[in-house]
């Protein structure tokens, strides 16, 4: 469900609570009192500061502190802040080289403490870091920068939390784990958007998200009807990955007044249903209706299991936001409801085709490793802000200690695939809320994403139901590409890839254009493409493919076709 996001810029991104160990080497400390002070002042009343004092007095609009940092090398840096916030939680605005990186959140303290604030690509030499007032009433001791050199070496288990998981679910999980950190899967909310993507991009996503919302009994009572299950079966038959969310209309107590209509019954403001009461009174009507609703959803999920369809299942999403009724009473009832869902669907209904996806970042809301396969975040920055949300990724990485997959299960603007590997933001997949909004994702950006080597689309998926469950090495990108032109033809050659057993040759009219298949199942490391136009320039990529169908594309090579002189 779309929400207003924090403004974040593309190259430099806000990071909250990144483990300090993500950077290597000695940190360079820059004392706040040596910076440019605007409306703020140096003080020494609070003990425990470093240097000659600290900066305080952030209490009026326009108050700011700017420091200049001077790294010896260009690169990705972690920026930490040592602060004091004795008057409760605070928030401030942060800028790097005059570009907003959104906000930094200070948790309450009783003295100075250091926190990770942002990751940024800093140039060699002078760079500025500025903090503006925000909520005000906090103290700044120093900033530090530390070059990020650690590349994540993930150690993700392929074992699902359900010991009776179906072979198809195991195969899908195996593929997701093998792909993790190598590429990101493209995804889209709402099946009705797929034809638009095919028409405008020439591609379909790897993942489609469907919604169980209108199967909620309290919606059915008002006449709601849907064919989401049948649509999911159709998508599966195309070879795509099926995901489901459930905008669970409250079982009862819908307000159903203007602005709070029955169909808004999953929102906290449109129902008085009390989850905490229901769970603490298992003999109550409220509890019985919870089970009724779960059983109704089980009927639909059973249809998918009968069709041998594994499902990325994401119930109780965005719980910590508390705008949905399942999060309105806080973390404890929500986690209890999640476990009730897991137990009833897994043990009572024997649904073994589900891969369980949790969708909150805060440790307080995490229901536990034993009932979660994948953790996730829903990302809604401002339109056109294609940052990779590395802050939320790193928070989730810390939450699960890098032992579970991390996905971006909803998004507005799609992260720039050029930046994902630079920031080590290894989202397993993204899933865009709307395909048609030019303000959120420009058509040029969508074309870039869907034709990017780092992004997996439907045509690049292996058979996810027969994918090997054991380890399966993803092919390296082909190298050593060479192109030789002749009369109306071009011969492309490349170096062999050890872990590939076949190759596919792709061609486009422009470097960033849509690459179409020229030849597939090639065993040799060369191919002559005939029937070309003399004088025209073509771009080629070579795709290395392994036994299970997993593939990696080469960088493009350009060739202008021309007949050789006799």
Image (cartoon, grey):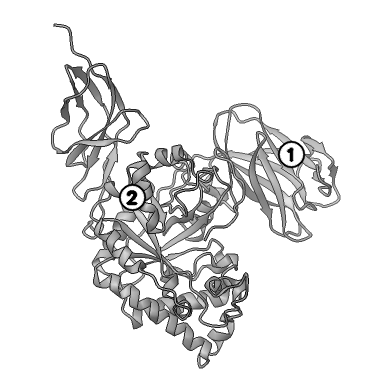
Q: Name the residue under label 2.
A: 179
- Measure the alpha-carbon separation of dots 1 and 2: 43 Å
Question: Which quadrant, please, contains the C terminus?
Answer: top left
Residue drawn at x 53%, y 40% is 148
Q: Where is residue 408 in the image (x, y as percent from the top left)?
A: 46, 54
- Please state if 331 lies on the left or on the right of 557 as rendered: right
Image quadrant in which you'd find residue 202: top left
Q: Where is residue 191 in the image (x, y as percent from the top left)?
A: 37, 58
Q: Is residue 164 visible?
A: no
Earlier along the polypeptide chain: callout 1 or callout 2?
Answer: 1
Image quadrant in which you'd find residue 107: bottom right
> Along the line of sight, which residue is nearer the eye, 134 or 177?
134
Q: Can residue 179 be seen in this view?
A: yes
Residue drawn at x 74%, y 39% is 31
> Looking at the rendered structure, which numbered label has been put on residue 355?
none
Q: Is residue 22 above or below residue 219?
A: above
Q: In this view, does 277 lie above or below 322?
A: below
> Looking at the rendered structure, which numbered label has been put on residue 31?
1
Q: In this view, does 352 lie above or below 98?
A: below
Residue drawn at x 78%, y 58% is 86
- Please state if 165 lies on the left or on the right of 101 as rendered: left
Of badges 1 and 2, the one in the foreground is 2
Disc 2 crowd rating (10 Å Cα; few below 14, some 14-19, many 20+) is: many
Q: Give SS at disc 2.
A: helix
Q: Position of residue 424 (x, y in %)?
A: 46, 44
> Along the line of sight, which residue is nearer the eye, 17 or 93?
93
Disc 1 crowd rating (10 Å Cα; few below 14, some 14-19, many 20+) is: many
């Amino acid at each position: 469900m779309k929400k207003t996001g924090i403004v974040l810029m593309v190259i430099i991104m806000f990071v909250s609570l990144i483990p300090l160990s993500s950077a290597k080497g000695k940190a360079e400390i820059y004392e706040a009192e040596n910076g440019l002070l605007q409306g703020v002042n140096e003080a020494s009343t609070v003990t425990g500061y470093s240097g000659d004092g600290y900066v305080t007095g952030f209490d009026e609009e326009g108050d700011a502190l700017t420091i200049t940092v001077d790294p010896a090398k260009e690169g990705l840096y972690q920026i930490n802040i040592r602060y004091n916030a004795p008057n409760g939680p605070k928030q401030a605005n942060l800028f790097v080289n005059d570009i907003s990186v959104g906000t930094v959140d200070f948790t309450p303290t009783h003295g100075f403490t250091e926190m990770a604030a942002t990751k940024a690509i800093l140039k060699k030499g002078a760079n500025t870091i500025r903090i503006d007032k925000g909520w005000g009433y906090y103290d700044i001791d120093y900033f530090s920068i530390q070059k990020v050199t650690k590349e994540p070496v993930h150690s993700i288990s392929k074992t699902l939390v359900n010991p009776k998981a179906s072979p198809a679910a195991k195969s899908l999980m195996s593929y997701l784990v093998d792909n993790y950190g190598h590429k990101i899967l493209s995804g889209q909310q709402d099946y009705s958007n797929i034809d638009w993507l095919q028409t405008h991009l020439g591609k379909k996503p790897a993942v489609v998200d469907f919604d169980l919302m209108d199967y909620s009994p309290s919606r059915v009572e008002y006449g709601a009807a849907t064919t989401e299950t049948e649509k999911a079966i159709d998508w599966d038959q195309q070879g795509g990955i099926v995901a489901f969310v459930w905008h669970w209309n409250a079982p009862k107590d819908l307000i159903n007044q203007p602005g709070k209509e029955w169909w808004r019954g999953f929102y906290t403001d449109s129902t008085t249903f009390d989850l905490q009461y229901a769970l603490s009174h298992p003999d109550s009507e409220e509890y019985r209706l919870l089970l009724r609703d779960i059983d109704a959803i089980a009927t639909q999920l059973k249809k998918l299991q009968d069709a041998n369809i594994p499902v990325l299942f994401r119930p109780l999403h965005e719980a910590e936001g508390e705008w949905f009724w399942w999060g309105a009473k806080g973390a404890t009832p929500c986690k209890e409801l999640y476990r009730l869902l897991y137990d009833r669907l897994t043990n009572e209904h024997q649904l073994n085709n589900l891969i369980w996806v949790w969708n909150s970042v805060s440790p307080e809301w995490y229901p536990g490793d034993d009932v979660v396969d994948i953790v996730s975040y829903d990302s809604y920055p401002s339109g056109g802000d294609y940052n990779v949300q590395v802050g939320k990724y790193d928070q989730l990485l810390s939450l699960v200690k890098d032992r579970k997959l991390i996905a971006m299960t909803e998004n507005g603007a799609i992260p720039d695939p050029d930046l994902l590997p630079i920031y080590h933001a290894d989202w397993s997949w993204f899933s865009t809320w709307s395909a048609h909004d030019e303000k959120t994702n420009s058509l040029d950006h969508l074309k870039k994403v869907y034709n990017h080597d780092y992004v997996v689309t439907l045509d690049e998926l292996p058979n996810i139901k027969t994918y090997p469950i054991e380890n399966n090495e993803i092919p390296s990108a082909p190298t050593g590409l060479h192109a030789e032109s002749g009369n109306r033809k071009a011969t492309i050659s490349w170096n062999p890839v050890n872990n590939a057993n076949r190759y596919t040759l792709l061609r486009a009219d422009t470097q960033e254009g849509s690459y179409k298949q020229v030849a597939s199942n090639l065993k040799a490391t060369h191919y002559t493409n005939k029937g070309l136009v003399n004088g025209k320039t073509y771009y080629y990529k070579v795709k290395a493919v392994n036994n299970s169908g997993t593939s990696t594309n080469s960088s493009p090579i350009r060739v202008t076709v021309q007949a050789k002189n006799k």
